[in-house]
């Protein structure tokens, strides 16, 4: 059997263990809540985390490229980008797959699996950096708005358009 066939055969086990490893990256009390219920309304972060892990795993069973992988990782990475994770902590959940693979897969295909995990990790890091950039631009635009409003109230500047505020962030 090749790698993808073995992954398909063990799909439920991989997804379950990867989800558990991912929520284990949160503080203990948060992890208990996140792992409890996969209802989108009662536990939105847990549900999105589980759905994203399933989507990424299903994607790696097919042929994928970096762009589709980043798109699949987007929901979980957006959540982790706004939480108090460092960049390495935010994408560390991907590397949990290596440990899971070592416990499930034959030694003959571990190297191939590790290369696959590395691709997922790189896509996760790329997506995280894009999210952090968006957050920075939003914060910068909001700061400009506040400062400009204060100057407007003081009668020191004329009104700026939305394009003026956003356009100057792109340079």
Image (spheres, rainbow, N blue to C red):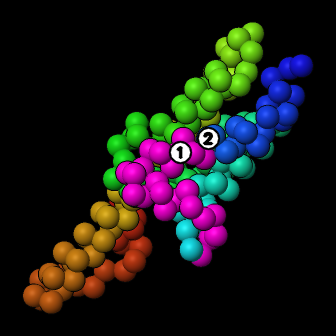
Q: Nearer the viewer, residue 15 or 151?
A: 15
Specify the segment rendered in magenta: 19-41
**The N terminus sits in image quarter:** top right
Residue 15, given in percent of the width and then of the height, sits at 69, 43
Residue 25, given in percent of the width and then of the height, sits at 44, 44
Horizontally, residue 62 falls left or right of residue 110, namely right
Q: Is residue 112 visible?
A: no
The numbered disc on residue 145 is: none
Residue at left offset 31%, top offset 80%: 160
Q: Nearer the viewer, residue 70 or 109?
A: 109
Find the residue positioned furthest to the top.
108
The numbered disc on residue 22 is: 1
Q: Residue 144: within the magenta?
A: no
Q: Residues within 10 Å of mark 2 (few under 14, many from 20)?
A: many
Between marks 1 and 2, how big is the CA–CA gap?
Answer: 6 Å
Residue at left offset 15%, top offset 82%: 150
Q: Which residue is mark 2?
A: 18
Residue contact at pointers 1 and 2, CB within 8 angstroms: yes
Residue 33, given in percent of the width and then of the height, sits at 49, 62
């Amino acid at each position: 059997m090749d790698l993808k066939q073995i992954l398909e055969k063990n799909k439920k086990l991989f997804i379950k263990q990867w989800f558990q490893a991912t929520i284990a990256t949160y503080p203990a009390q948060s992890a208990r809540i996140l792992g409890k219920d996969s209802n989108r309304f009662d536990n939105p972060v847990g549900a999105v985390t589980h759905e994203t892990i399933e989507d990424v795993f299903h994607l790696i069973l097919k042929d994928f490229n970096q762009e589709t992988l980043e798109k699949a990782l987007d929901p979980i990475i957006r959540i982790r980008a706004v939480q108090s994770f460092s960049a390495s902590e935010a994408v560390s959940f991907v590397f949990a797959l290596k440990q899971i693979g070592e416990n499930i897969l034959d030694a003959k295909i571990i190297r191939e699996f590790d290369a696959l995990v590395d691709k997922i990790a790189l896509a996760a890091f790329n997506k995280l950096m894009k999210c952090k950039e968006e957050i920075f631009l939003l914060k910068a635009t909001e700061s400009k708005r506040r400062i400009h409003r204060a100057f407007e109230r003081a009668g020191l500047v004329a009104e700026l358009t939305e394009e003026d505020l956003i356009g100057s962030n792109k340079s």
